[in-house]
Image (cartoon, helix red, strand yellow):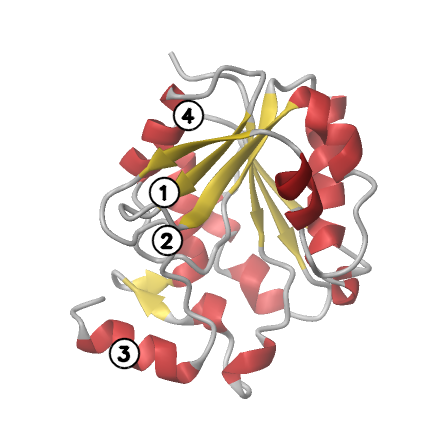
Amino acid sequence: MLPRVLVLLPAAGVSARMRGRDKLLEPVRGQPLLRDRVAAALDLGLDVAVTLPPDRPERAGILRDLAGPRLQMIEVADAATGLSASLRVGADRARAGGYAGLMVVLPDLPDLLTQDFRTVLQSYDSKSILRATAEDGTAGHPVIFPARALPALARLTGDAGARDILRTHPVIHVALPGTRATTDLDTPEAWAAWRARGGR
C-alpha cells in the first residue's frame, strides 16, 4: 500500500523561456503535456492537486474531463511571484488534510512514468525528504517532503522553490532509470531535441 501523500503538480508558471508557446500544452503521447502528467499521477490512486495561473484558462480546460474527488484544481492568484506560491498552496493543503507528506512532481518532465512515482513512494518512510535522481545520481524529481517539513514549505518566497530546504535537511535519494527524473523541457530547442531523440 502506498503512503497517504498529496501529489502536487505546480502548473502555475508562465513558460517564460518558450517564446510565446505554453510548454504545458505541448503534445506528449497524443495529449497536452499537463494532462498527460496529471493522468499519470491519478493512476497512483492518491489525491492530486494541480496549481494553475489565473490567466491561462486553457490549462484548466484540458483537465476538466479528469475532474473528480481525487483531483483538486487550485487557482493561484499570486502565481507570478514564482514556484514558491504553488509550493505554499500545496503545503497548506497537505497540512489541512493530514497527509503524511507532499510529493512535488514538476509537470514539465515528460519521461516520468506512473511506475517511477510508485518507486519513489514505496521508498518513502514518512520521516525523511526523498528525492529522485537520474541513473547517474543527478538530483531531479519527484521530491517527497514529510509532514514535518510542510511548515517550512508554507513559508517559502520567490522562484527558488524548495532549494534552501533541500540544502539544509538530510535527503534520501532514489535513482530512476536513465534521465527520466531530470529531463525537463523549458525551451523550444529542448522540445525539438527531445522529439529528435524519439520523444513523443
Name the residue that disc number 1 marks.
Answer: 40
Tell me if residue 41 can be seen.
yes
Whole-Å distance between the Cαs marked 1 and 4?
Answer: 14 Å
Q: Say which quadrant the C terminus sits in.
A: bottom left
Q: Looking at numbered disc 1 in the image, what kind of residue is underneath it?
A: Ala
Q: Are marks 1 and 2 in contact (CB under 8 Å)?
A: yes
Of helix, strand and loop, which one carries label 3? Answer: helix
200 on left or right of 34: left
In the figure, 180 relative to 56: above or below?
above
Mark identifier at residue 121: 4
* Residue shown at 65% from the left, 49% from the top: 163
Mark 2 vs mark 4, foreground winner is 4
Gap between marks 3 and 2 measured at Cα? 20 Å
Q: Quadrant of residue 82?
A: bottom right
Q: Position of residue 71 (x, y in %)?
A: 55, 37
Residue at mark 3: 193
Q: Give the vertical position of 130 relative to 106 (above or below).
A: above
The answer for how far apart the CA atoms under marks 2 and 4 are is 19 Å
Q: Which residue is mark 2?
A: 36
Q: Residue at x 36, y 42 (%)?
A: 40
Label 2 sits on a secondary structure element that is helix
Q: Are marks 1 and 3 in contact (CB under 8 Å)?
A: no
Among numbered discs 3 and 2, the one appearing first in the sequence: 2
- Percent of width and height locating residue 107: 48, 55
Residue at position x 28%, y 34% in the image: 115
- Who comes first in sequence, dot 1 or dot 3? 1
Number of other residues with Cα within 10 Å of mark 3, as a class: few under 14, some 14 to 19, many 20 or more: few
Instruction: Please indicate, yes or no, whether residue 75 appears anywhere in the rendered image.
Output: no
